[in-house]
């Protein structure tokens, strides 16, 4: 029986094997559940111990799928010259100790029903123009009192441009750090989940749209709190959209975006952005995002919702994009943040013009579907 444990550094996980004489070579490592192997991409074998860099909770994300099933470690010779080595794993309590959260462990009061269906929140830094579009869109889903903006140290508070009933929570600002960003949003989402059955988190330039309209989506969310199932049974867990697209500003023919008018009446083109832009953003359970909000650690709980679109307004207005690029190129980032996403965006009209010319020439560009017209 192999033995999983941790020492002082929460970022590292260890699995000690009962066999100390596995020959070195081109080895690959995985954890196995019911004959399905899940790769451990950041593991190294040192004598009889597998050392795993677990900064992104790779091991825990695999174990989340296990339930009460036996977990085994697999060591495979990539050259195929030696047979696979498989051994069941027993986990010491030290392995899970860093993840114990007593607030989450508290059982809910018997009979308490959350008073509201949906909260929508975002985070922003000096993005008041885009926040006005964000607020106008989501105020069609819920009353303004269920909208929350985390103001991360803006020079001009969003309070000056938003509806008086929209909640603005101001927090101090340090250097940009993407891990810190997802952490405070994760905790804020948990706070909202104490009183709301569902919480939607988006960036300030992201609009969630359902082909059948807001009422259809809200009715779906208000269904029974069971497992994810057909329309009428009600979903649960974490939902991601079926479609994700950039809303493109056709700078050849279209003017700047105007507040108070439908965006879909002012813009005509979408650029599909599938893959990681189909973000897990609507949840009835706590969500723990990875930097960028494109993935969650609770990936086993993520379901794709048919008919749901995430529309990204970043390139929907060339003037606003130029202003945003200049702002982000100038922000102070931590060393870690620079390693993840160094800011070098097109910051003059000529460079941005080339960017738009390339985007508009992309063969994937399509007209906005009629099913979405008037819905954003």
Image (spheres, rainbow, N blue to C red):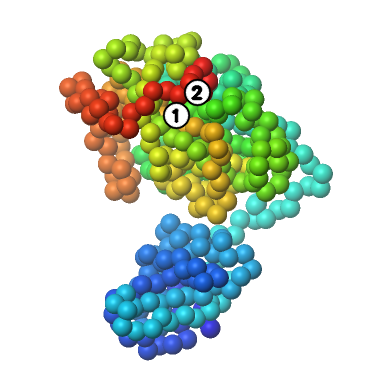
| Position of residue 344 in the picture relative to residue 301 (left or right) | left
Q: Is residue 9 visible?
A: no
Q: Which residue is mark 1?
A: 311
Other-residue count near label 2 (Cα within 10 Å), few / some / many at <14 / 14–19 / ≥20: some
| Position of residue 193 in the picture relative to residue 303 (left or right) | right
Residue most extreme to the right: 111
Instruction: Tell how many labels.
Output: 2
Could you tell me which secondary element the residue under label 1 belongs to?
Answer: strand
Res 372 label: 2
Residue depicted at x 55% and y 24%:
138
Residue depicted at x 32% and y 47%:
340
Other-residue count near label 1 (Cα within 10 Å), few / some / many at <14 / 14–19 / ≥20: many
Contact flag, marks 1 and 2 (Cβ < 8 Å): yes
Gap in angstroms between the C-alphas marked 1 and 2: 10 Å
**70 relative to 187, above or below:** below
| Position of residue 313 in the picture relative to residue 87 (left or right) | left
| Residue 20 placement (x, y as % from top left) | 40, 88
- Residue 267: image quadrant is top left
* Between 201 and 253, the one nearer to me in the picture: 253
Res 278 label: none
Could you tell me which secondary element the residue under label 2 belongs to?
Answer: helix
| Residue 69 placement (x, y as % from top left) | 61, 70
């Amino acid at each position: 029986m192999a033995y999983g444990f941790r020492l002082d550094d929460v970022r590292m996980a260890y699995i000690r094997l009962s066999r100390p004489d596995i020959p070195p070579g081109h080895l690959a490592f995985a954890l196995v559940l019911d004959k399905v192997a899940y790769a451990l991409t950041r593991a190294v074998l040192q004598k009889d111990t597998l050392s795993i860099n677990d900064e992104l909770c790779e091991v825990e994300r695999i174990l989340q799928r296990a339930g009460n099933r036996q977990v085994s470690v697999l060591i495979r010779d990539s050259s195929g010259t030696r047979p696979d080595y498989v051994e069941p794993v027993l986990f010491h309590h030290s392995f899970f100790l860093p993840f114990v959260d007593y607030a989450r462990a508290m059982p809910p009061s018997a009979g308490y029903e959350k008073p509201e269906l949906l909260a929508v929140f975002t985070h922003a830094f000096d993005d008041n123009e885009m926040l006005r579009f964000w607020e106008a869109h989501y105020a069609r889903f819920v009353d303004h009192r269920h909208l929350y903006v985390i103001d991360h140290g803006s020079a001009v508070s969003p309070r000056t441009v938003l509806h008086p009933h929209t909640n603005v929570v101001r927090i101090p600002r340090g250097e940009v750090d993407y891990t810190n960003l997802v952490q405070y949003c994760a905790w804020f989402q948990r706070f909202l989940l104490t009183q709301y059955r569902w919480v939607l988190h988006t960036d300030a330039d992201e609009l969630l749209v359902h082909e059948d309209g807001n009422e259809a989506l809200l009715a779906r969310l208000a269904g029974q709190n069971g497992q994810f199932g057909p329309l009428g049974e009600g979903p649960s867990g974490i939902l991601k959209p079926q479609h994700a697209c950039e809303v493109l500003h056709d700078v050849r023919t279209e003017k700047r975006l105007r507040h108070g008018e439908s965006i879909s009446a002012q813009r005509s083109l979408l650029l599909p952005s599938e893959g990681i832009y189909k973000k897990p953003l609507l949840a009835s359970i706590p969500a723990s995002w990875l930097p960028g909000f494109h993935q969650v650690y609770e990936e086993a709980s993520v379901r794709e919702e048919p008919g749901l679109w995430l529309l990204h307004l970043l390139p929907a207005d060339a003037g606003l994009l130029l202003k945003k690029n200049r702002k982000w190129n100038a922000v102070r980032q931590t060393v870690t943040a620079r390693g993840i996403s160094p800011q070098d965006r097109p910051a003059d009209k000529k460079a941005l013009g080339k960017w738009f010319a390339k985007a508009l020439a992309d063969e994937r560009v399509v007209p906005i579907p009629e099913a979405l017209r008037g819905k954003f």
